[in-house]
Each structure stands twice: as structure tokens, then as C-alpha cells.
Amino acid sequence: MSNAAIIGGGVIGGGWAARCLLNGWDVTVFDPDPDAERKIGEVLANARWALPMLYERDLPPEGTLRFAATVAEAVADADYIQESVPERLDLKHRVYAEIEAANDHAPIGSSTSGFKPSELRAGLASGQRLFVAHPFNPVYLLPLIEVVPGGAADPGIIERACGFMRGWGLFPLEVRKEIDAHIADRFLEAVWREALWLIRDGIATTGEIDDAIRYGFGLRWAQMGLFETYRIAGGEGGMAHFIQQFGPCLEWPWTKLMDVPDLTDDLVRAIGDQSDAQSGHMTIRELERLRDTNLIAMMRALKGRGSAAGRLVTDHEAAMPRPGHEADRAAVPMVTVRRAIPIDWTDYNGHMNESRYGQIWSDGTDEVLRAIGAGPEMVDTGSTFFTVQSNTAYRAEALAGDRVRCETRVEEVAGKKLRVTHRMIREGDEVVLAEGDQILLHVDMATRRSAPPPPEMAARMEAMAEAHGGKDL
């Protein structure tokens, strides 16, 4: 089992810990804060609820979390080290010195949002393994990591660290030159400054500014970024035409980007009061849950289109063991689905919509078909199965975040007929949530009519029915 050391257990450090743990790594945390275990526990609870909902498969078995009494103890056996202490350069240097004395091989990433790697490395003997690995909150959901090697980094170390991150479902974006605040925070700083002016000058409130983002360009940016969005604005002429058309705007007084308003007591009070009026009816935990729910829904929508962050989720999922692997196939009943119920599968009653039970049965049956040699690739050979009857009995509510498995039996084989039954079970308390019964017929795709399956496939069907205690007629 691989081990990650997390130095600093705040919101960001906790997010790193959760991301690693839920992808099967053991994690050791050092943080002198007496509330560190509680705080990380809260972040981890959010992550356990949220991250599995991105995927159509179960995540790897969770790693083991432990807390160390010293930096040296935390990093001693680490394969990867992530520093997430407060933004004080002297503190970071002291931490690096302790890391260096206790571990001489692991990559060391820093979550710093502003310091350059050349500043972080000052005075270190092994600075070539230290680099910026700047994440975005919540780390357990948002995939971007700005990786800034700087000139002195060991390329092999960077490659190894980025490989770890991809294995955790992250997107390491290598920043080719070091610069204050890296890439994304420079954009955010520009937007933040302009927003402060709009509030100071009485032009907009915090709520109106947020509405301008979430109902407009924020949606465009989330799925296409800045330059692809503007390329579309250029029409058939593309980006060059866009720049020719809108380039003169750069000389117009559309921004106060180079100026920063004084954060006077009045301005701070106005921002605080407006923010309270906008969001004060919700606790921080409620806001976090709303944020995570919305992020999951958007990323799952993008996943369905194979685009942006959704494509990354699909790629990460493809590397996970699928249900129906050898151990699951050998089980009786056969375990055909392991997953979390995602938020977009629930309805206004807060429980899983009935159509999604059919999705579970369909996915479960697909694993049976793969096992008998009738997976999706068999369609090209002219052989497949059609469902002709499906029934569901609902036994208990399934809620968003529930971890479930589907147990499937081949109950009956009769020539071209295949009957399977399913039980969807909530993991943890083993409550049976629903039971399904499906009848399928083998179909010749050339005629799209039922036909006997090939002899080899029929033999596998009969063997599975016998193993499952079903009927071979």
C-alpha cells in the first residue's frame, strides 16, 4: 500500500488527505492543531459522500488514516509528501528542513497559492524534489493541480508525482515558468479586484456579482474555458476575427484592473453585510453540501458529453476494476454492480427515481452477458440479447450517496431465453433496497429477430445457470 504524508490539516490539507484515502492510499497527517482530527474528519465525511457519486463504479478500498506526533514521523515512510501549512515562508522552510532530515526520496509538493518554487527551495540541500502543487478547494472534487517545477526540479520526480496525481483522478497542469500566484489565481485576483470596485462604487452587490457569474460566463468557462469561448464569438473567422473585432475594447475604460480600492472599514462592512444578506441563512456546512452537490451534477453532465472535467472522470473510472471481475464473477450470487447513488439519480422526494433501478438492472445484466461472451463488442458479430420483460419490487428507499451492490443470479436458460434476477443491497447495513427480474432473448442482428445463441455461448449460459442454482431447460 502506498503512503502519502500530509503536513498541515486544514481545509486544503484535509482535502488532499481525502483525495488520497478514497483512492486507496494510506495517509499520515501531521498538524499541531488539537482540533486537526475533528477538522479532517469533517472534510473526509464530505468527501466520502461526494466523490463516489462521480463514478459508475466503486472506488478502491479506502486507505488507512493516522495522525503523527511530528513531521519526521509523518514523512518517514511516505512515497509522496504534500505540504499545506499557512502561507508563511519562514514556517514552510522550517517544515522542509524537518522533511529533508527524515525522508530523502519522496516528491514534496507545496499547496502554496502564491510563492514560487525558487523561494520555497532556498536553503534546501535536496530542493530538486520540491515543487508547487497548487490545488483548488474542494480538493476531493476539483481535479486541477497547478504543478510548478521551476528550473531546479528533477524531471523524474515531477513525472512520478504527476503519475500519482493522475492515479488519484487529478489533472496536473504543468506551469512552464514560475510566476507569482501561478496561472488560475492571477485570473481570480483580477476578477476579485474588479468586483471590489463594483461594490465600492455602489454599482453592484455581492449577490448581483455572483449572479452575473453563475448565470452567465461562469457556465461557459466551466465547460469551455476562456479562449475556446471567445473563438466561438469570432464566428467563422475564429479567434483572429474575434481579436480584430473586440481588440479595440482593450483601450476603453472597461476595467480598473491596475488599481486596487482601499479596503476601508466601510467597504469591508458593506461586503460583509451584503454577503450575510445573500447567504447568511445557510451554515458553512450547508453551503459546502450545496457546492459539492452542484459540482457533482455539473461534472456528471460533462462526463456524459465526454468534455472538460467530465472526460477526466471517465478516464479515471476506466482505470478502476469493474464489477464482474474474476472474484465477483466467481461469487454466487454474482456481484455485478458496485457504486454510489449519485445526486442526479434522485427525485423531488429525495430518493432514487424508479427509472434508475432499471439502470442498475441493465448494468448488472451487462456483466452477466460479458461473462457468457455476449458483451457490447459481440454486436459487431451479429449476436446480442434484447430485454423483453423487466419487473421491479421496491423494498426500501435508496438515497444520494448510498453505496450499493447488485447481486445477480442466472435463474433460467431455455434455448434463446435467458432469465436473470437481481437484488440491490445497501452496503453497511445490508438492507435489500429492491429486487428485479428480467427476461432476455438472444437476437440475430441481421434479422433483428430472436434466434438460438451460438453453441459456445449457450454452453456458458447453461454452466452459469447450474452454478447459480437456476434452471437449465
Image (tube, rainbow, N blue to C red):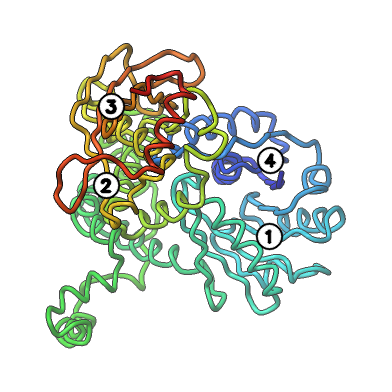
* Badge 2 amino acid: Thr
Q: Nearer the viewer, residue 363 or 101?
A: 363
Q: Earlier in the sequence, mark 4 or mark 3?
A: 4
Q: Secondary structure under badge 1?
A: helix
Residue tagged by mark 1?
Answer: 89
- Residue 202 in the figure: left or right of residue 50: left
Q: Secondary structure under badge 4?
A: strand
* Badge 4 amino acid: Asp
- Quarter holding residue 106: bottom right
Q: Secondary structure under badge 2?
A: helix
Q: Quick one: label 1, few (<14), some, or many (20+) residues within 10 Å?
A: some
Alpha carbons under labels 3 and 2: distance apart:
42 Å
Residue tagged by mark 3?
Answer: 357
Q: Tell me which residue sits at (31%, 11%) in the image.
A: 395
* Badge 3 amino acid: Tyr
Q: Position of residue 61 (x, y in %)?
A: 59, 35
